[in-house]
Image (cartoon, rainbow, N blue to C red):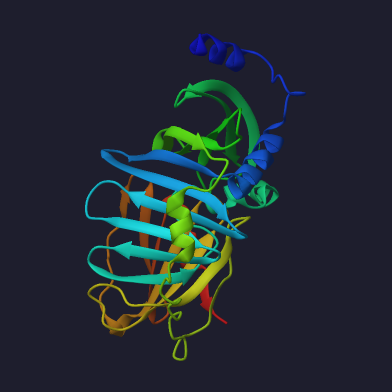
Amino acid sequence: MRIILLALLILSPLSHGEELSAKEWLTHMSQALSEKQFKASIIQVQADHVRPLVFVQGLVGEQHISYVEYLNGPPKNAVKVGNKVTFLEHDQPPYSVTANLIQGVWPASLSGNITKLEQGYQFVLGGRSRIAGRAGQMIRFIAKDEHRYDAQIWVDMETYLPLRYDTLNRDKQLLEQTMVIELVEFIESPSILVEASKHKWPEVINQGDRKDAQDWQFTWLPEGFNMVVSDNHRLIGIHEPVEYIALSDGLANISVYVARTTEGPMPEELVTRNGLSMVVEKVGNAEVVAIGKVPSATLERIARSLALK
């Protein structure tokens, strides 16, 4: 009987009001991701790699708390209390950073200002289907230019929470998929989040020391992309710090690393796998590596546009 009811829900208009536009669905989803208390069992798929995880979110007092546990491989968890995210890994001490969400589950913009995504994407209403035993409405993110990939999301028709998110390349091939296999909504915050609110987590680590850093700027970025992070990193095999710049349009993320050519070797080959492209360019006396799930031509143009202020 439940399957019959779900089928009727998928095939029929919404029972609680007029049909929503694609943007209205996304706006409701953003609000749900920010406010609802729930647990989602999730699998993330990239080609032959599958990563299962559990995501829990709730409100304890006035604090927004979320928790992620990765279920395969060595123990690895993350907890967010307020605007502090703490990472717990088996091979290093816990450490904390300032962040509004735990990266790597859903794109940050899905729980933020949906309107900002309209700079790079057109929202198109798709069909309905059943995911994790729940009726879902699909919305497509159609790229407005050739500098990024398309995406699509299924939103739960009951809770407005995301059920599935796909990234597609220019040939409409699936690059990456995040899919809920079980979704449970809570009235009261679960005990694991209550305990997290009481725990004394490590203080936030200092950002990279930029006293010797150079100020870089981009003379060209695709519409909608902005710089979200700029600091110093130390990469494996490179003893000297490199400049790190993170770019995002809300769905796609790009990492740019800049090092002086005399400070250590950087990769020299172009690698594209699961939609993750990498390019290496020389800009003056610096070597620039750009990595991201966007076309390699986009990365090349971004890297070549880098210049000192």
| Residue 261, position as x, y percentages in the image | 32, 80
Q: Residue furthest right?
A: 18
Does 28 appear above or below 109?
above
Does 117 appear above or below 248?
above
Question: How many numbered marks are there?
Answer: 0
Residue 225 in view here: yes
Location of residue 187 (image quadrant): top right
| Residue 80, position as x, y percentages in the image | 48, 61
Location of residue 285 (image quadrant): bottom left
Looking at the image, which is closer to me, 44 or 300?
44
The residue at 37%/60% (across/down) is 279
The residue at 45%/40% (across/down) is 40
Looking at the image, which is closer to me, 238 or 42?
42
Location of residue 239 (image quadrant): bottom left
Does 309 appear above or below 86?
below
The residue at 46%/47% (across/down) is 56
Q: Quadrant of the C terminus?
A: bottom right
| Residue 177, position as x, y percentages in the image | 41, 38
The residue at 51%/49% (across/down) is 57
Lateral position of residue 152 relative to residue 275, left or right: right
